[in-house]
Image (cartoon, rainbow, N blue to C red):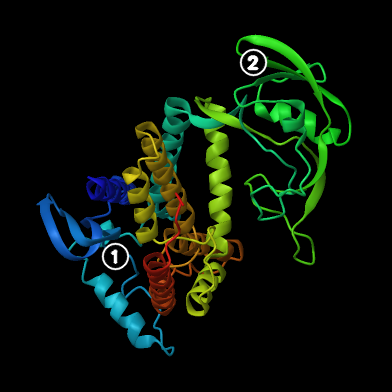
Amino acid sequence: MHILWYLLGILVFALLLTLSVALHELGHMLTGKLFGVKVTEYMIGFGPKLWSRRWGETEYGLKAIPAGGYTALIGMYPPARVAKPYRGPFAKLVREAREASDATIGPGEDARTFYRLPVWKRLVVMVAGVVANLVLAVVFFLILVMGIGQMQPTTTLGTISECVQSSTTSQRACRSSDPRSPAAAAGLRVGDRILAVQGRATEDWADVQAALEPRAGKATTLEIERDGRRSTLTLTPARAQRVVTDAFGQAKHRADGSVLTRSSGFVGVAPTESRQRGSVGDAVSQFWQTTVASARVVVQLPVQVYSVATDLVTGRERSAESPLSIVGVGRIAGEVTSSGQVGMLDKVAVMLSLGASLNVALFLFNLLPLVPMDGGHAAGALWEGLRRRWARLRGRPDPGPFDAARLTPLTIGVVCILVVLTLVLVVADLVDPIQVLG
């Protein structure tokens, strides 16, 4: 049964990936057809075809490798009779790419080519894919935050620490030399609900933290509820060093690379958590935080993958914050769904969170101004528009369409780099996978 649940998790993630890619490509196809461009293929996946069927002038199908997809619009590049000759070091590659594009244009179909579209229409076609991913990510976050809800700390105590420890140490067990925690000394118990600190009501755990942290060394009154009865007790928060984190929970560092800490009041309690539904604003906030965090990963991806590769070679422990391949995310999905420690609603929430993060990543990655990503084609269209406008302002002849075929060598280079980065992460996820459940 365990393996069946594991495989189910991988299958669900594969379906989420397929849905995300399908909607991305659907955005390209629908807008292309809307503007009159002939679409010859709409494919999910790469490699050998598993299934295909032709409806009208478009062939729809699934391919064996579920790692992306494509929409084939005719005339992506200006034909040889329109483009200026290219005699650079990669002339053969450029010529072959142009010939392949020319081969998609049938008799009388020149008016239906992609390169003939006005700049703004080409931008719409290119951006439509990432917009589809953006919308799907927002939908997932709305369901996750407003429908299912997220685990949030409450003002009810879940654990009581017996001693005072700094958060900068990896030690977990109390030693005989460690001082007793203020919570244990004051007689707090698991299940107590904190109603007020120093007479100020505490609606949530953030209120409790905000009230206790600045009171290191100061006697502090707590109003609590225990077994339905209210009572008041006094404790003195100890002074402890806490790691300073950013909005995404990541440790901040000083200029010399050391972890930034601050003095803070320590009581020695941790809250229970309950699932709470949020508002549209909460969903938007969650989406924004995920987008910013994902943008950092995308920008730093080459450096992070290099770090993963060196960890593999040297045998160092892999960072839990390192990037994952599709294989790694699939393994996490399998671990979560097959775990007896995770409830069914939590499993659904995790899968929705993975789907939302996946679409945010697709949205950001495809916006990169590099071919073959959508952002690269959009950048080419924008450059063409600026060049033509500049020519008109200076009274010069129309310079013609931007020749994206000349970027073929760059396209091949980018694809090769992406293949290498992907292979490194896949190997790491197979050899040294990140464990999310310990």
Residue 81 on image: x %, y %: 31, 76
User: Taking the image as drawn, is residue 29 in sight?
Assistant: no
For mark 2, what is the residue?
226
Question: Label 2 amino acid?
Answer: Arg
> On the picture, is 50 further left or further right than 96?
left
Eyeballing the image, is 153 above or below 96?
A: above
> Which image quarter holds the N terminus?
top left
Q: Mark 2 or mark 1: which is in front?
A: 2
As drawn, the label of residue 374 is none
Q: CA distance from mark 2 to mark 1?
A: 73 Å
Tell me which residue sits at (44%, 43%) in the image: 134
What secondary structure is marked by label 1? loop
Q: Secondary structure at mark 2?
A: strand
Q: Is residue 197 visible?
A: yes
Q: Amino acid at mark 1?
A: Gly
Instruction: Specify which label sits upstream in the sequence, 2 or 1.
Output: 1
Q: Nearer the viewer, residue 176 or 22?
A: 176
Report x, y in % for residue 325.
40, 62
| Dots 2, 1 in contact, CB < 8 A | no
Taking 38 as reference, is 196 above or below it? above
Depth order, front residue of 156/367: 156
The correct choice, above or below, for 273 with respect to 410 in the image is: above
Locate residue 35, reporting x and y percent.
32, 48
Residue 292 placement (x, y as % from top left): 58, 49
Crowd rating for badge 1 (residues with CA inside 10 Å; few <14, some 14–19, many 20+): many
Residue at horizontal 37 percent and vertical 59 percent from the top: 326
Residue that sits furthest to the right in the current view: 218
Please, which residue is most extreme toward the front here?
176
As rendered, which of 363 and 313 lies closer to the eye?
A: 313
Residue beneath label 1, please? 75
Q: Is residue 164 toward the left or the right of residue 380 in the image?
A: right
